[in-house]
Image (tube, grey):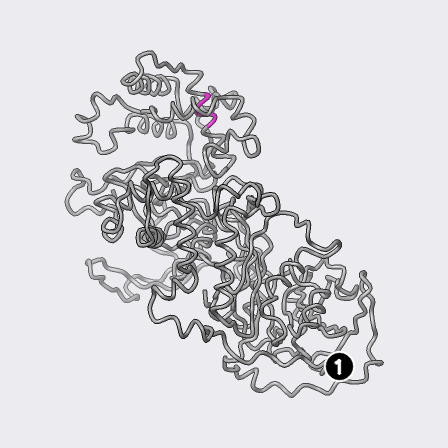
Amino acid sequence: MQTRCTTQKALELIQSSASPWDSDGEDIDLQPDSDSELSSDEETLPPPQKRARLGSEPSQTAKDGTVWREEQVGTHLDFTPIEPYATDGEPSAEARRSIQSRLQSFLCFITLDMLRSIQEWTTQHARQEQQDWFMDLPELMAFISVVILRGVNKVPSLCDSWSANLGNPRIIATMARSRFQNIMRHLRFDDMLTRSERAETDKFAAISDVWGSFVTNCIASYNPGRHITIDAQLYPSKTRCCFLQYIATKPDKFGIKFWVACDLKSQYICNAFPYLGKDPNRPSGERLSETVVMRLMEPFMDKGRTVTTDNFFTSLSLAQRLLSRKTTILGTVNERSREIPQSARQMDRTEFTTQVFSTTGATLTVYAPKRKKAVYVLSSMHSVVETEDTTKRKPNTERRVDFLVELAKELANSHFTRNKMQTRCTTQEALELIQSSASPWDSDGEDIDLQPDSDSELSSDEETLPPPQKRAHLGSEPSQTAKDGTVWREEQVGTHLDFTPIEPYATDGEPSAEARRSIQSRLQSFLCFITLDMLRSIQEWTTQHARQEQQDWFMDLPELMAFISVVILRGVNKVPSLCDSWSANLGNPRIIATMARSRFQNIMRHLRFDDMLTRSERAETDKFAAISDVWGSFVTNCIASYNPGRHITIDAQLYPSKARCCFLQYIATKPDKFGIKFWVACDLKSQYICNAFPYLGKDPNRPSGERLSEL
């Protein structure tokens, strides 16, 4: 979260659409780092030139009427920046006096008055069901401590926090699981008797009193430094409310969006408020972005601070409003903005050129990192723009650039990590990735799968390589013996070696002849892998389990296939919870028309893939007994239905699961952490699963001395 890099790298990241933190239009936040040391190039830069008379530069009028004057790079502009705020962020005097321990630090933000209110309102709700229900303040604080510990120690489900294997001893010692769930069920943050009245004017009524107190305490407890960054943050939530946001580019998709102002250096949250939809109190014609920035910055105005924004917020009108309150802005500008002058919009620029424009109280820097690509940066804090004395001549408006990474960034990055089994790269790229310890897919010891990329074009260097030389006599090369006794002989690059490669498989992957004959529709394609015999077995075993509770329970094959279709549709249409798949707002009409939610849940509860009467006997020799028969048939059908091409990739794949079984894997570097690990072989070109089996722990049948990877 405190990554530091040069201006050159920052500009490259701004341009890169594949940047892991450049999601849903949120750009990199820029700020000058006055504490950093200057590079040798920066130290040798000539002093800025004295600016010529303004009348000598041509002026241009943008579409919105803004008059810009093109300036020479390195000249002083005719405006004087405001005096910057000189102190780094630090706790307020009141906070320093009151905080002597971690508990006092917590009570600085969540005060005893707030805790008493939560206690009162939670008790009020609980006593509607149980008259003698009670919770005192120490128990409420113990509950909060368990919530914090559960956030630190991730486990598949709430129950596992109290389990013998995965549970946290502190959680187990602090509170019983049943009591935790009981408090969680009744937890309230407002007076439910007056909520309906308050909700008419406040959509956030259910928590606004406590939230307002929390934000007030955040503002009062810390004095931020010069640079404050403003951005949007989507906090995952399954709450069904009118202001729930769906953002497809975010890892968690659904949540409540907050506008957040953070101190750039410490990443302390200085101010925040939720986005509740259209605000009727917003002045007509005022941009949402300007309203957000002015509201967040209100407690920190008139002191010379700088606000850093992305292209959603940055505008010249906002810069002028902030300047009137002795606050400057630095941020990227959308290339389609009407404020950009016409000459700055030209795309056929010479590579590594910089163009500077000025207007009253602001500068616009346009830099071309490559042809037909431009970066627009608006600043009201700089009276001179210079370029580095290097080949790329990057504008060094800032000597150093810091990045403000969103809270919980590691989680976000993990979601953006590409699946290795579905990634194609050249051999050169793969070798570079294997060498890089910071590679996003080089986690938990799983290596990149290499394959020659026959479709990729050769570079100019590769096209001009001479033909391979004839290999010299073997005895002329020195031989070396590895630790395991293998004898290696060093060879010259480009020489023919003394072994003949086997004849390569010449056909691309394709369906087998049997599959081509039998598949005429999507349904037949499905039945090629999940056959009618397999479906009948699942129907029989599911009915067997259900009839232990209800003797007349029945499910026929069409209903089972309808159930599977709902499972597939729910995988395609992601919603916060199962109930939402049938809701009026978020539900899928096909799901609603196919099966009632209660019936779907009933089948899901009884679904079985084996004969439960014989499972215990089979489980003595097969840990995967609960599904091994169906899984074995599925894999056999996969093998029989497709002839893979020349290149097959083998890797491990962690399939997320909350099943509590002896072979459940925990891999901290994976996005979902818990799951069942499968060894999978895929056709490289089509990504078809050719073969797979689960990792069930140590295999007693594996020959002694044989590596697991070879098996």
Q: Name the residue under label 1.
A: 78
- How packed is label 1: few (under 14 Cα within 10 Å), some, or many (20 or more)? some
Residue sitting nearer the eye, 676 or 429: 676
Give the residue displayed 19% in from the left and 30% down from the top. Answer: 619
| Horizontal relation, residue 703 to residue 534: left or right | left
The quadrant of the image that shows the C terminus is top left
Is 462 or 417 nearer to us in this picture? 417
Would residue 384 be visible to someone looking at this image? Answer: no
Q: Which amino acid does label 1 sit on?
A: Asp
* Residue 52, quarter of picture: bottom right
Residue occupying image coordinates x 31% and y 54%: 138
Which residue is most to the top?
552
The magenta region covers 562-566
370 and 295: which is toward the camera: 295
Report which quarter residue 608 is drawn in: top left
Position in image of residue 133 (x %, y %): 33, 41
Indicate the position of residue 501 as horizontal and vertical percent values.
Answer: 37, 47
